[in-house]
Image: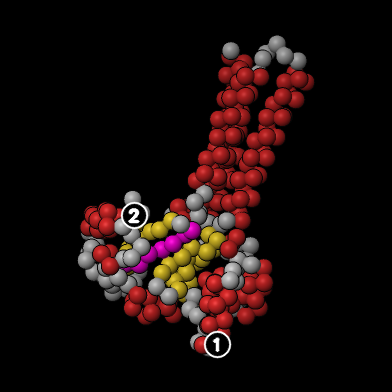
Amino acid sequence: MKFRLKAFGLHLAGSAAALTLVLGAFWLGWYRWPGWYLASVLHIVGIVVMVDLVLGPTLTLIVANPGKPRAELARDISIIVAVQLIALGYGGVTLWRGRPLYYTFSADRLELVQASDLKADDIKAGRRENPALAPSWHSRPRWIWAPLPESPEEAQKIVGGTLFGGSDIIQMPRYFRPWEQGVAELRKQLKRVDDMPYFTPAEKHTLKGRVAQLGLPADQTNTMVMWGGSRRLLVVFDRETLAVRALLEPN
């Protein structure tokens, strides 16, 4: 049993180190709050953790028979490690493709834009026409303003195209502008929690309580919804500076 436990401990330590390195890099680079929440990646992380920290070391505990020939034991553990690496690779690729790139303000809301949301043609156009705000492989999440073009014809073309599966304005980096340029428009779109159309009465009650717990005014026009897929957050701004004061879950 001592041999099995030693093999289990070594396998668990190695798996934990590899998992910490990969997931830590993604968390530090792209998935800090609210990225991991809005991108809904916990199920992917859960699968990887289950395979690498639970299934892999447990199988090693089972197969690590001290009476087994070393060549056979090495083969069995190699198979287990290969399965773990496949799971880790799957998780890493999925997290990379879905990494948060932008938190965009457009119209009356904030929205998460992930790498998988951007089409290759839109990325190329952004790098050509707006290189300062276009994404690259090492881009970290940025807060930007995504207004419609000033040309009514061009704006209508984008809006109409969106209805038929075309790219939305928040997926077109060539139109992105620095966050600071959009704060005047942002101020006009702020609402009270009670006036938010995207939350149920029960969620509004919960949110107002959380805002009050933070010592922030819960009855001012200082909030906006942030979307990430089907997930929502309430973003609370400072009315004077428009700095983000809190990002709150509705439940």
* Secondary structure mainly formed by the magenta segment: strand
Q: Amino acid at mark 1?
A: Glu
- Please provide the residue range marked out in magenta: 223-229
- Describe residue 121's horizontal placement relative to residue 43 as left or right: right
Against 177, residue 220 (above or below) is: above
Query: Residue 147 or 205: which is nearer the viewer?
Result: 205
Asked whether the viewer can see residue 152, the reply is: yes
Q: Residues within 10 Å of mark 2 (few under 14, many from 20)?
A: some
Query: Which residue corresponds to mark 1?
Result: 153
For the point 28% across and 67% down, the residue is: 195
Query: Which residue corresponds to mark 2?
Result: 250
Mark toward the start of the polypeptide (2 vs 1): 1
For the point 62% across and 80% down, the residue is: 129
Q: CA distance from mark 2 to mark 1?
A: 38 Å
Name the quadrant containing residue 209. Answer: bottom left
Mark 2 or mark 1: which is in front? 1
Question: In the picture, which quadrant includes the N terminus?
Answer: top right
Where residue 170 appears, x then y in whole percent?
52, 71
Where residue 152 appears, x then y in whole percent?
51, 88
Q: Secondary structure at mark 2?
A: loop
